[in-house]
Image (cartoon, rainbow, N blue to C red):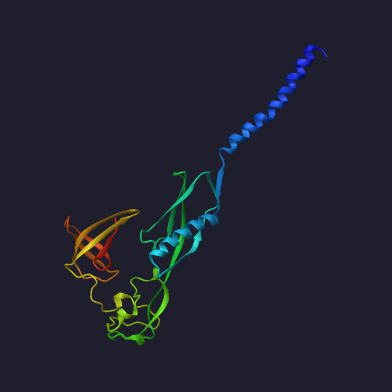
Amino acid sequence: MTLMLRLTTILCLTCLLTFPLIVDGHAAKVDEQKQTVIKPEQVQQYLEDYLDQQQRKMPQTKLRFRHLRLPKAFSVPSGRLTCEITPSDPRVLSSRRFSLIFRVDGKATKNITVSTTLEALAEVATTTGDLRRGIILSEEHIALAERDLNRLRAPCFDSNELLGKRLKRSLRKGEVFERSAVAFPPMIKRGEVVTITAQKGILTVTAKGMAQQNGNAGDIIRVRNISSKKDLVCKVTGPVAVTVEF
């Protein structure tokens, strides 16, 4: 074999030996860009975990999703994955959509919205029979039954608070005792100083106000902001507590 032929053979062998190394090097770069696939059932689990957290704030209520419209599977970069969930309504129970922000190593990589119906079951006071307006309520008139709170305005949860109260309007058997149907002393009295809470997403602002009307839970009343002297339309949420939306 001539010297030239030997050099040519050595060069060819060298090229063949180095070729796999080039392929391996390309594959290593692809591996660095691995993706994590998020399946619909994983999205549902994130939502269920969020609902469990809300459940702890309302131990008397059973929360569950109905008609949950989950997205198709999608991919995000590999890394430490977290999910931030925000309801469409700060009161949560009235929410019809939930926004999910997926972050990888702290950086937002995917934002999706899931439509659903939220069911909130709790025991509330109901009538044991047809009741006429003006009747004074006793134990024989009241029974506890499970109902969806989203279908109710301001139900009574404790039957004891109804005892001895006068019924303001007639109710049929099985109806829920809404607070507006019973003659309760006002939860908030005109001239009483109350706390006004305004919430938008994660932002919450409070201020002191003076009630311009009497009101019970769920009622809409006018409240004057003590600092600005402006009247606001607020919803009664509890003793000396009202909310207003931006």
Horizontally, is 200 left or right of 61 in the view? Answer: left
Q: Eyeballing the image, is 133 above or below 207?
A: below
Image quadrant for the N terminus? top right
Residue at image x 49%, y 46%?
80
The image shows residue 245 at horizontal and vertical percentages of 29, 58
The image shows residue 210 at horizontal and vertical percentages of 18, 63
Task: Pick whichever, 209 or 17, lies toward us.
Answer: 17
Q: Which residue lies furthest to the right in this view?
A: 1
The image shows residue 159 at horizontal and vertical percentages of 34, 80
Image quadrant for the C terminus? bottom left
Quarter holding residue 213: bottom left
The image shows residue 244 at horizontal and vertical percentages of 27, 60
Horizontally, is 202 left or right of 97 in the view? Answer: left
Residue at image x 59%, y 38%?
31
Q: Eyeballing the image, is 198 above or below 1?
A: below
Task: Pick whichever, 191 or 78, lies toward us.
Answer: 78
Counting labels gives 0
Quarter holding residue 133: bottom left
Q: Eyeballing the image, is 232 above or below 132?
A: above
Residue at image x 23%, y 66%?
240
Q: Which residue lies furthest to the top in this view?
A: 3
Q: Eyeballing the image, is 15 above or below 200?
A: above
